[in-house]
Amino acid sequence: MIDLYYWPTPNGWKATIMLEECGLEYRSIPVDIGGGDQFKPEFLRISPNNRMPAIVDHDPLGGGEPLSVFESGAILEYLAEKTGKFLPQDTAGKYQALQWVHWQMANLGPMMGNANHFKNYGKNLAGDPKQLEYGTKRFVGEVDRLAGVMDAQLSVNRYLAGAEYTIADIITWPWAMLIGRLLGEEMFEPNAHLKRWVAEIRERPAVEKGFQAHRDWGQRELTEEEEKARRELLFNQDAAKVRKAREEAARATA
């Protein structure tokens, strides 16, 4: 059994989709990132970066004590190794897939997160809208560029890493399928290969099941005060707050 610490966001969907694709038995444990669950001592012991998803495998690869893994890229690599699925065994194929996994982790996810922050959340946080202009242009432009990178790759390959469906597709799809919402659906007009791939991946039953997992958890309508507290929690973290959370976790385990 695998415990999945999860909230229905693009990063969370990476893990649920992979678990569904692999046919692994798992139990979802909610980590309400808007309510501060990511700072609870029991979660910090599993995910010291106070981010979800994270897993605890009670029947780990190689045996032994339960194994915890945080960071979505590491989780997908671990599950691929554990099951022998969605990661080619030959060296060339393996690293063709892994380079796109790391591309997503370093590029598409962070850039889309920043673009969404400046374009949508920032207007509720900044006093002067002009403060948002450069950040919005910078990150929205980078997302547009990355869409072009994917489209070019998919113009000559069925999937991101070639002819085979891999963890590169699983880890990238949850963010890529939201590009139209961020940039406008018209962005798919010059990116027809990306549009084809997004639609094709979603046709996989395990993808849809993972995407829909516990969607209701994140759909409660917040009061204005709750939304303000949520924004403060999500966007105003610093080293001092991290240290405080770690100290509280240490006291809880002492």
Image: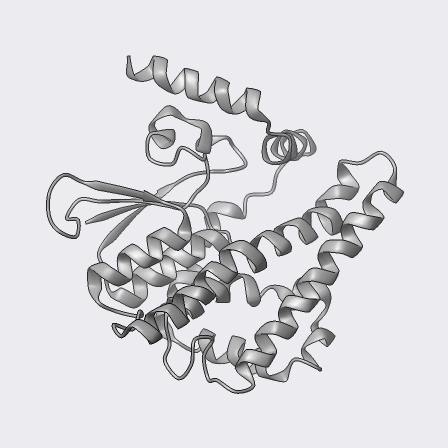
Which residue sits furthest left?
Answer: 63
Foreground pick, 140 / 149: 149
Among the 4 quarters of the image, the one containing residue 22: bottom left
| Residue in the image at 76% along x and 36% along y | 125
Type of colouring: one colour
Percent position (x, y) of residue 147? 63, 70
- Tell me if I can see residue 195 in this picture: no
Q: Residue furthest front?
A: 91
Residue located 49% across and 20% down the image? 243
* Residue 33, x across and y down, in percent: 50, 38
Count of number-bearing discs:
0
> Where the C terminus falls, by quadrant?
top left
Q: On the rendered structure, is 119 left or right of 197? A: right
Residue located at (37% from left, 24% from top): 41
Q: Residue furthest bottom?
A: 156
Question: In the displayed structure, does residue 173 sit left or right of residue 59?
Answer: right
Q: In the picture shown, does residue 225 fall above or below 7?
A: above
Q: Is residue 225 visible?
A: yes
Q: Nearer the viewer, residue 150 or 55?
A: 150
Q: Position of residue 25 (x, y in %)?
A: 22, 56
Q: Is residue 170 above or below residue 70?
A: below
Rendered residue at 77%/52% (across/down): 136
Image height check: is 168 above or below 35?
A: below
| x then y, percent, for residue 90 | 27, 75
**Is 37 situated above or below 129?**
above
